Amino acid sequence: QVQLVQSGAEVKKSGASVKVSCKASGFTFTTYAIHWVRQAPGQRLEWMGWIYAGTGNTKYSQKFEGRLIVTRDTSTSISYMELSSLTSEDTSVYYCARAIGDGYDYWGQGTLVTVSS
Amino acid sequence: SHELTQPPSVSVSPGQTARITCSGDALPKQNTYWYQQKPGQAPVSVMYTDTERPSGIPERFSGSKSGTTATLTISGVQAEDEADYYCQSADSYGIYVFGTGTKVTVL
């Protein structure tokens, strides 16, 4: 069965970087795009960017350009999301999701990233 | 960038019908997707490409779209349907956006 399993919760200081992983199984990793979406406490879902696992092509929300890097390792079927220059406003649950068409069919369980000053 | 607007909340009695709207100027040219999110859980897809229901989603969930407004309808609402609901679409440049979210309360 399709699964996206994310790495565990992180606590970071302001100005640091965080790297979250998303391990895919149950499908051919290289034929899908993996997206990253975050949700601040009590707030809406916010799209961050995607990577097409086959080619490594990426697209980022303009909001995160310059401090977001999404990568993938096809040998392990893992996508990584790295966000730098963290501030308290980056405290959120970060999700990976598998894209189907222009939407999503499977989601990871989420990773809480807490940024403290 | 395109935006999607939803009502903040919808309240409905058990067995009644809940309608959640999603408005966006670009929706006539884009597919709409809907997700249900319960507290502390990841979102779950309940509708894709405007009107298609994923396997495992109850038939009481249906979708429609007219012009700039997409609608998720829950007929015969049950207590377990209480959740936040988000619409989502994408433009031709690969930019994705989520709606503002609607909290459905079952009275």
Image (cartoon, helix red, strand yellow):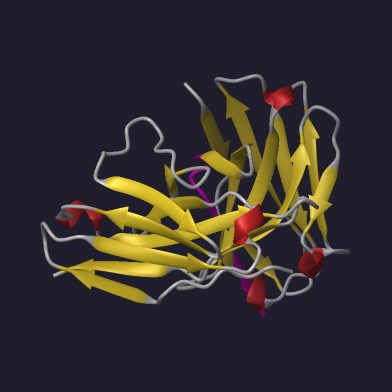
Q: Looking at the picture, how far across and down is residue A70, in whole percent?
A: 79, 47
Q: Nearer the viewer, residue A63 or B78?
A: B78
Check if residue B66 falls in the magenta segment. no
In this rendering, is residue A23 above or below B19?
A: above
| Residue positioned 36% across, 64% down in the render | B20
In the displayed structure image, the side of residue A94 where residue B19 appears, left or right = left
Give the quadrant of residue B71: bottom left
- As drawn, the residue found furthest toward the bottom would be A117
Residue furthest front as drawn: B67
Judged left or right of residue A81, residue B12 is left
Q: Is residue A104 visible?
A: yes
Q: Nearer the viewer, residue A11 or B31?
A: B31
Image coordinates for residue A111, horizontal then vertical, percent: 55, 52
Query: Which residues are drawn in magenta?
Result: A106-117
Residue B41 appears in view: no
Residue at 20% from the left image edge and 60% from the top image edge: B17
Q: What is the quadrant of the N terminus of chain B in the image?
A: bottom right
Q: Residue at x 46, y 71 (%)?
A: B6
> Is A113 inside the magenta-drawn segment?
yes
* Residue B76 percent location from the top left of the image: 16, 52
* Magenta portion: prevailing SS class: strand
Quick check: A37 above or below B62? below
Q: State the quadrant of the C terminus of chain B.
A: bottom left
**Residue sitting nearer the eye, A59 or B60:** B60
Q: Nearer the viewer, residue B65 or A99?
A: B65
Residue A33: quadrant of the picture: top right
Vertical comparison of B104 with B29: above or below: below
Outermost residue on the right side: it is A66
Residue A114 location in percent, x, y? 59, 67
Which residue lies at the image location 68% right of the left edge and 24% below the top edge?
Answer: A29
